[in-house]
Image (cartoon, helix red, strand yellow):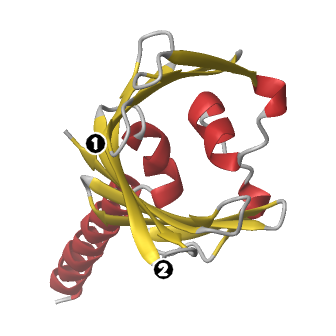
C-alpha cells in the first residue's frame, strides 16, 4: 500500500511540475507592453493623429505612414491634411513640405522630445515608467506624461500633451 501511495504522490508531483513549467513558459511568452513597444516600431505602420484645436474647438486630424529603414532611420509620410515627409535619424530631423517645396533641417541636439528619442534609440528609462499594466503604461519625462496602450497586437495608441499644451492622440496600426 505504501508503494501505491508514493507512486500516486509522484504522479501528482509530476503533474504540478508540468503545470508550473507551462505557467512559467506562458508568462515569458507574454512580454510587457514596454518590451513590445520596440518591436512594434520596427514594423511598417500607418497612423492617425488627432489634436484638439483650442481656437475653433475642433479636432485636427493628420494621417500618414511610418517606415523604419534598414539603417534604423525613419521616414514618416503625412498624407493629409498637408503633404509632408519627415526623415529622422541619429543626426536630426529633415522636414520636406511638399506643397511649398521647402526643406528644413533640425539637428538632433535641438530636439528635446521623448517620442523622438525613443524612436531613434529604442530605449526607455525604466525609472520613468509608471502604472505598468497588462496592455498599457505611462512614461513621465520633463513634466510631460505619455500614455501608451496596446488596443490589440496590431494597434497602439499614445496620448500626450505637446509643448503647446495641446492634447494629442496618435493611433498606430500595423500595415
Q: CA distance from mark 2 to mark 1?
A: 26 Å
Q: Nearer the viewer, residue 86 or 117?
A: 86
Q: Nearer the viewer, residue 123 or 24?
A: 123
Tell how many labels.
2
Considering the image in quadrants, where does the N terminus appear?
Answer: bottom left
Q: Quadrant of residue 83?
A: top left
Q: Residues within 10 Å of mark 2 (few under 14, many from 20)?
A: few
Residue drawn at (24%, 52%), measured in percent from left and top?
Answer: 154
Relative to residue 95, is residue 40 depicted above or below?
A: below
**Numbered mark located on residue 46 in the image:** 1
Q: In the rendered image, is residue 134 in sight?
A: no
Q: Nearer the viewer, residue 86 or 115?
A: 86
Does label 2 or label 1 sit earlier along the sequence? 1
Q: Residue furthest bottom?
A: 1
Residue drawn at (68%, 37%), measured in percent from left and top?
Answer: 117
Q: In the image, residue 121 lies at what x, y percent?
A: 65, 30
Mark 2 lies on residue? 57
Considering the image in quadrants, where does the C terminus appear?
Answer: top left
**Numbered mark located on residue 72 in the image:** none
Q: Tag 2, which secondary structure?
A: loop
Q: In the image, residue 133 lies at what x, y percent?
A: 50, 75
Q: In the rendered image, is residue 117 in sight?
A: yes
Q: Residues within 10 Å of mark 1 (few under 14, many from 20)?
A: some
Q: In the image, residue 144 lies at what x, y percent?
A: 74, 65
Residue drawn at (50%, 9%), measured in percent from left and top?
Answer: 71
Q: Quadrant of residue 116?
A: top right
Q: In the image, residue 164 lies at what x, y percent?
A: 72, 62
Single out the mark in the foreground, 2 or 1.
Answer: 2
Left-right relation of 8 to 117: left
Amino acid at each position: 500500500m505504501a508503494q501505491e501511495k508514493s507512486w500516486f504522490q509522484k504522479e501528482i508531483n509530476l503533474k504540478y511540475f508540468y503545470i508550473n513549467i507551462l505557467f512559467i513558459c506562458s508568462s515569458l511568452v507574454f512580454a510587457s507592453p514596454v518590451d513590445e513597444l520596440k518591436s512594434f516600431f520596427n514594423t511598417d505602420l500607418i497612423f492617425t493623429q488627432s489634436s484638439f484645436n483650442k481656437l475653433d474647438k475642433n479636432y485636427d486630424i493628420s494621417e500618414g505612414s511610418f517606415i523604419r529603414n534598414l539603417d534604423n532611420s525613419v521616414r514618416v509620410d503625412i498624407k493629409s491634411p498637408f503633404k509632408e515627409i519627415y526623415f529622422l535619424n541619429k543626426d536630426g530631423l529633415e522636414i520636406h513640405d511638399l506643397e511649398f517645396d521647402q526643406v528644413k533641417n533640425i539637428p538632433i541636439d535641438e530636439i528635446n522630445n521623448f517620442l523622438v528619442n525613443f524612436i531613434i534609440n529604442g530605449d526607455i528609462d525604466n525609472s520613468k515608467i509608471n502604472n505598468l499594466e497588462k496592455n498599457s503604461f505611462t512614461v513621465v519625462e520633463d513634466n510631460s506624461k505619455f500614455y501608451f496602450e496596446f488596443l490589440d497586437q496590431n494597434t497602439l495608441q499614445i496620448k500626450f500633451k505637446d509643448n503647446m499644451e495641446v492634447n494629442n492622440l496618435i493611433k498606430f496600426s500595423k500595415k
